[in-house]
Structures are given as C-alpha cells and as structure tokens.
Amino acid sequence: QVQLVESGGGLVQAGGSLRLSCAASGSIFSDYIMGWYRQAPGKQRDLVATITKSGSTNYAESLKGRFTISMDNSKSTMYLQMNNLEPEDTAVYYCNQVGFERFRRFETWGQGTQVTVSS
C-alpha cells in the first residue's frame, strides 16, 4: 500500500511561483508513473504532468514552459515547480501514482492541496 501526501499549496498573486511536494511512503513497485493532476471548481480533474521512474516527463500542452515536474528518488518525493502563475491555475492539485508489479496495476491518489492564484 502506498501513501501520498501533498504539501506546498497556498495563496499567491498572479505572476508568482509555488512549489508543490508529494511525499510517497509504503510499498515500492518495480515500475511506476507519478503525476500531478488538478481540479478546478465545477470542472473535471485534468492532467498537469507525469514522470516515470526513469525520469521521462510529460506535460499538458498548455502548461509547458511554466510548470516543471521532478523527482528526488532518495527522498521518495515528487515536486511541481509552478512559475508565472495565472488565476486560471487555481485548483486543487492532486498527486497520483500508478505502480506496476507482476502484471498488476495499483493506483493511489493523495488528498490534494489547494492552490489559489489571485489577480
């Protein structure tokens, strides 16, 4: 079983920056993909970015250049650096892990952290 705990959310003015963290604990899978998703009020949960165990990254097209996903394997912690934030970035940001072990798939979500960008 995996536990994911996000931190780093808060209130920031437009143009500012925040760094979110997602600390993972518990089971360690032979392979996994971790990612950040966000959900604004009244909207569906959308992909922000993902990173594989080997370090390959993928971003939502609209966020490329402003957001950077990274992973510190020594700390089992994933990060999301968000720069030049816009009011439209206001959402609850969720950490996600999809683990693969012996042909089985295990998915875990964190509890979410609120990011509010004021204009």
Image (cartoon, rainbow, N blue to C red):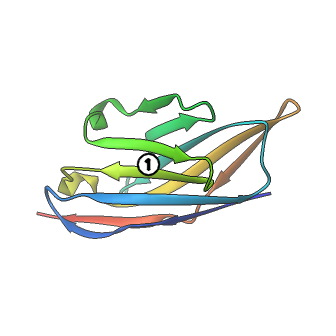
Q: Position of residue 41 (x, y in %)?
A: 36, 61
Q: Position of residue 11 (x, y in %)?
A: 26, 71
Splitting the image into 4 quarters, where does residue 49 fall?
A: top left
105 with respect to 94 (left or right): right
Disc 1 target residue: 44
- For residue 41, say whether it is visible: no
Q: Position of residue 99 (x, y in %)?
A: 73, 41
Residue at the extreme right of the image, as rendered:
102
Residue drawn at (18%, 59%), measured in percent from left and top?
16
Name the quarter where the N terminus is drawn. Answer: bottom right
Residue drawn at (22%, 67%), measured in percent from left and top?
12
Q: Position of residue 97 (x, y in %)?
A: 64, 46
Front one among 113 and 82: 82
Residue at the extreme front of the image, as rendered:
74
In the image, is residue 74 above or below residue 100?
below
Residue drawn at (47%, 48%), measured in percent from left and top?
37
